Image: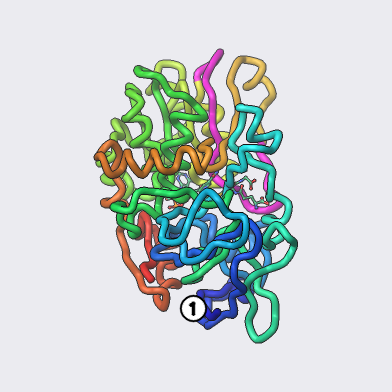
Amino acid sequence: MKTRAAVAFEAKKPLEIVELDLEGPKDGEVLVEIMATGICHTDAYTLDGLDSEGLFPSVLGHEGAGIVRAVGPGVTSVTQDDHVIPLYTPECRQCKMCLSGKTNLCSAIRETQGKGLMPDGTSRFSYKGETIYHYMGCSTFSNFTVLPEIAVAKIREDAPFKTSCYVGCGVTTGVGAVINTADVKPGDNIVVFGLGGIGLNVLQGAKMAGANRIVGVDINPDREEWGRKFGMTDFVNPRNVGDVVETLVNMLDGGADYTFDCTGNTEVMRQALESCHKGWGTSIIIGVAEAGKTIETRPFQLVTGRNWRGTAFGGAKGRTDVPKIVDWYMNGKIQIDPMITHTLTLEEINKGFDLMHAGESIRSVVVY
Ligand code: NAD
Ligand code: AHE
Ligand code: ZN
């Protein structure tokens, strides 16, 4: 079949809207019509050529929601017309990682996914006979895409696509980092570095968990107002204080119980670790740093009891947890609507990247 898609032909070039050829679903795969997709900073990072796994030409996008239009042989967990969210972190429930009970990092298809291919080692997308790579196993910047059934979460049918697509990455990553990875307890003090599409969801997760001081840190002054809408109690603009670590440590009587990096900047990651309370504070890296970057701190920071951790997809097990997070949204336990600041057509998708880089959007969503 044919599908309209925004294709990343080359790094650092705008996406091009073209009609691609798409092969139907093979064994264990499903064809999904994507109804809406968010634009996450990780898409921009890959498009900018900063991803060590980045492949071109490819169809980016990993924050979608849609409808199953066809299923391949052997598919049992979803059927035609089901509403689904694609999962860049699948959940096979059979691999060592899934069975460990210790991680959400399913290993069933990670190797081929990182090579831009389906589990059988081939791509379903092509253009004028040339292979176009999948991205993060999702490729939601295509109106139709093919996914393994272990990489879709079935969701309720009354959830709007335009907002529930955000659960496919930003919402689950931010809220999940607080409740799954950190396991923030009532009364904990937390600091969130970077109040964008992910950081604001960390804030609302922290509020839900009953955190005491919820401090937001951002170099964009507009983010203070945004943070306050989602539970932030204090705001620090690093450009207005001498030493951000000293400021936070003083503000929180020795430092935070938990800090979260939602910037992807390795210098900020160090600040986040060093703003933790001596003896027990834990810093959680959410931000994705560009290829070749490394983190640094004095080992003394760890010797004296601070902990450095990271999280992917908020530690969520996609097929199990994503439908529950959609329920939380539909029941009003978490907010999504105010964070969708821009709605675009596929033809306007490059504007979404411009708005993100200019700090003008929280989430831009393409509605097909
Ligand atoms: P975004 O562009 O919406 O937000 C980034 C925010 O960080 C902006 O508000 C920006 O002003 C702020 N910022 C930039 N430099 C800063 C600095 N030096 N100090 C303080 N604040 C600073 O991006 P996003 O979509 O929220 O994504 C954030 C990061 O999380 C990206 O690196 C993205 O790749 C990553 N991410 C990781 C996961 C995961 O599973 N681990 C999931 C989604 C996104
Ligand atoms: N490909 C990059 C790493 C990118 C990365 O860490 N991705 C996160 C999700 S970001 C979503 O917006 C993730 O899930 N990581 C775990 C995994 O298995 O990829 C690189 O550095 O090579
Ligand atoms: Zn993302």
Point 51% across, 74% down: residue: 6
Residue position for label 1: 4
The quadrant of the picture occupied by the C terminus is: bottom left
Q: Nearer the viewer, residue 348 or 23?
A: 23
Left or right? Give the position of 283 relative to 155.
right
Q: Is mark 1 within 8 Å of ligand 3?
A: no
Main SS class of the magenta portion in the image: loop
Q: What residue is rendered at 31% in x and 52% in y?
A: 159
Give the residues in magenta. 277-295
Q: Position of residue 205 (x, y in %)?
A: 37, 34
Q: Which residue sits at x=32%, y=63%?
A: 342
Q: Is residue 189 visible?
A: yes
Q: Is residue 115 magenta?
A: no
Say which quarter of the image contains residue 198: top left
Along the line of sight, the residue nearer the viewer: 196 or 324 = 324
| Secondary structure at numbered mark 1 | strand
Q: Looking at the image, which residue sits at the far bottom?
A: 128
Q: Is residue 180 above or below residue 118?
A: above
Q: How is the image coloured?
A: rainbow
The image quadrant of residue 253 is top left
**In the rendered image of this protein, does residue 140 appear above or below residue 220?**
below
Residue 157 screen position, x and y as percent: 33, 53
Q: Is residue 215 above or below residue 195?
A: above
Q: Is residue 240 visible?
A: no
Going by the numbered disc 1, the residue's amino acid type is Arg
Q: Residues within 10 Å of mark 1 (few under 14, many from 20)?
A: some
Quadrant placement of the N terminus: bottom right
Q: Residue at x 53, y 82 (%)?
A: 19
State yes or no: residue 286 in magenta.
Answer: yes
As drawn, is 304 to the left or to the right of 262? right
**Residue 71 at x, y = what percent?**
54, 62
**In the image, residue 289 lies at what x, y percent?**
61, 48
